[in-house]
Image: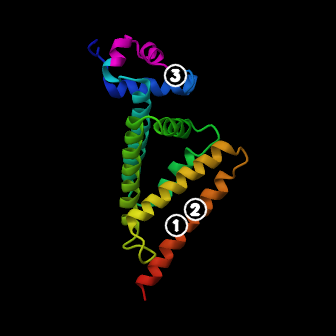
């Protein structure tokens, strides 16, 4: 097996993203990644054994980058999180097309399923931790911050499905109202704390 040239895994992921954006998932190949990066196919195979592995790593890279960026925000973390999610909620969403395509593949491929499951767990935990920065306790008795994280992650993914399948989906309206929901829960919690 070829040894990696002067390129690392993260750089290959960068080139793979470019290939996906330019050609789409259907025409994505490891050969195209190698050509885009200016390396041999063996170099790509050294880092990624399969096409699916690089696609899952792209999803993971996007998620980690997004949460890293959001975690840097001190004020308005909920608003920033919603803006980040909204920016990927489009009919032509590269990220969600990739994520849902891999999710379907994961139904028959345990490795993909496990890797995507780990990504979802990390996203749920990141959401939960960010909610703890805003809410001193849960706005609803009996609902943990972990459950709130899972629920809001499910809402965001559900909205992405809506946007992918319905070109008339009102993304701006729905996200504005989702922000109102967060504000309402936060106000409700503050009023309860002041009693």
Crowd class of label 2 (few under 14; some 14 to 19; many from 20; radius 10 Å): some
Upstream in sequence: badge 2 or badge 3: 3
Upstream in sequence: badge 1 or badge 3: 3
Give the residue drawn at x 60%, y 57%. 175
Residue 71 percent across, percent down from the top left: 37, 52
User: Image quadrant of residue 114?
Assistant: top left
Label 1 and label 2: CA atoms lie apart by 6 Å
Residue annotated with mark 3: 28
Give the residue drawn at x 42%, y 71%. 143
Left or right of 42: which side holds 21? right
Residue 46 included in the magenta stretch of the image: no
Residue 90 percent across, percent down from the top left: 62, 43
Label 1 and label 3: CA atoms lie apart by 38 Å
Residue annotated with mark 2: 178
Which mark's residue is nearer the viewer, 2 or 3? 3
**Prevailing SS of the magenta stretch:** helix
Quarter of the image where the N terminus is located? top left
Of 115 and 153, the residue lying toward us? 115
Left or right of 1: which side holds 62? right
């Amino acid at each position: 097996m070829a040894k990696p040239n002067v390129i690392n895994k993260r750089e290959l992921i960068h080139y793979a993203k470019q290939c996906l954006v330019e050609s789409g998932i259907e025409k994505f190949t490891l050969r195209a990644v190698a050509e885009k990066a200016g390396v041999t196919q063996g170099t790509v195979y050294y880092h990624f054994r399969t096409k699916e592995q690089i696609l899952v790593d792209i999803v993971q890279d996007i998620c980690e980058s997004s949460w890293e960026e959001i975690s840097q925000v001190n004020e308005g973390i909920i608003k920033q999180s919603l803006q980040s999610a909204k920016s990927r909620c489009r009919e032509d969403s590269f990220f969600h097309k990739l994520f849902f395509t891999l999710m379907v593949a994961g139904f028959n491929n345990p490795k993909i399923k496990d890797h995507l499951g780990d990504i979802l767990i990390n996203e749920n935990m990141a959401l939960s931790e960010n909610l703890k920065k805003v809410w001193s306790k849960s706005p609803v008795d009996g609902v943990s911050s972990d459950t709130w994280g899972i629920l809001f992650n499910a809402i965001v993914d559900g909205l992405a499905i809506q946007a992918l399948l319905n070109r008339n989906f009102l993304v701006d309206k729905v996200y504005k109202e989702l922000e109102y929901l967060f504000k309402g829960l936060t106000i409700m919690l503050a009023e309860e704390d002041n009693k």
